[in-house]
Amino acid sequence: MEYLVGVFVGLGACVFGTIAGFDRDRSFYPVMLVVIATYYDLFALMGRGTALGPEVIASTPFVFAAVVAMRTNLWLVVVALAGHGVFDFYHTDLIANDGVPAWWPVFCLSFDVLAGAYLARLLITKRVDAEANPGFNKRLRPYVELELIAASEAEADGRHATAFLHLERAHVLGQSSTVQHVWVHVRMLLWGMRRHDIKEVIGQLVRIAGAGAKTWAGLVPRGNTGGSNVSAFKSMPIPADLAGVMANAQTSVVIVD
């Protein structure tokens, strides 16, 4: 019975959010995740309080995921809701919290899975934008392509250092988009292979994996030029001309002549 109640309550909350227009604000599902994650903390306070520490430790990653998702990509909320459903399933075995009603973990699991699936549907159908600023990367893409073209032309002329400089500029511009970020690193990898630069090849293989895994969550160092000659975790100053392009892309459509 708890499973069915969780499903119906979850569906009711999500449908109400759509009808009322609450889910047009990208904070709706991150806030829902925070509320869900901290219910166990509340139950610990309602009990003897001995489980509050473990419950806060357990809820913190989900609260952190909600904050990151709000600023980057709502698919992280889908993953976190599914993860909290797994936590619900094992909660009784993991934490002894006498304030939790016996029916709650099963109810919460059903609610989590339903809410996660509903949000995933909204994201897939584009009724809700997954990215915090979906137009930003589209507006920057022409500039990334210009740098990549310039890199190809420089390398064809034998100006290999200049070619890599343009690849670095493309990396600075494109690193907030998973597709563009990975593609620039692939271009750097190919540059290294043509130059028989083992250090660059190895460095780019690692960075390609990192770009694919971390970009969607916004875990990229701003201004990093992307080559193996710099730390993959180091934030760097952005050249003035590129900073201007990026600032313009935040608020308006940029036109490349």
Image (cartoon, rainbow, N blue to C red):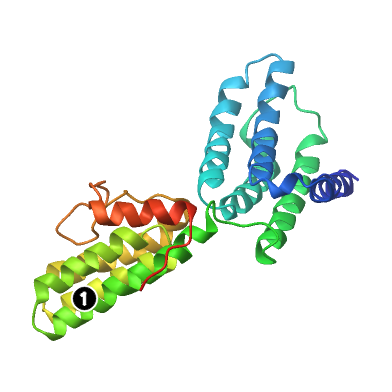
User: Could you tell whether 112 is left or right of 207 in the image?
Assistant: right
The residue lying at 11 percent from left, 84 percent from top is 157
| The quadrant where residue 229 appears | bottom left
- Outermost residue on the front side: it is 257
Residue 131, compared with residue 41, is above or below; it is: below
Q: Which one is in front, 69 or 112?
A: 69
User: Could you tell whether 250 is left or right of 256 in the image?
Assistant: right
Q: Is mark 1 on a helix, strand or loop?
A: helix
> Residue 84's spot in the image, x, y percent?
64, 44
| The quadrant where residue 120 appears | bottom right
- Please state which amino acid type lies under the numbered disc 1: Ala
- Outermost residue on the top side: it is 48
Q: Quadrant of the N terminus?
A: top right
Crowd around label 1: few <14 · some 14–19 · many ≥20 (10 Å): many
| The quadrant where residue 206 appears | bottom left
The residue carrying mark 1 is: 151
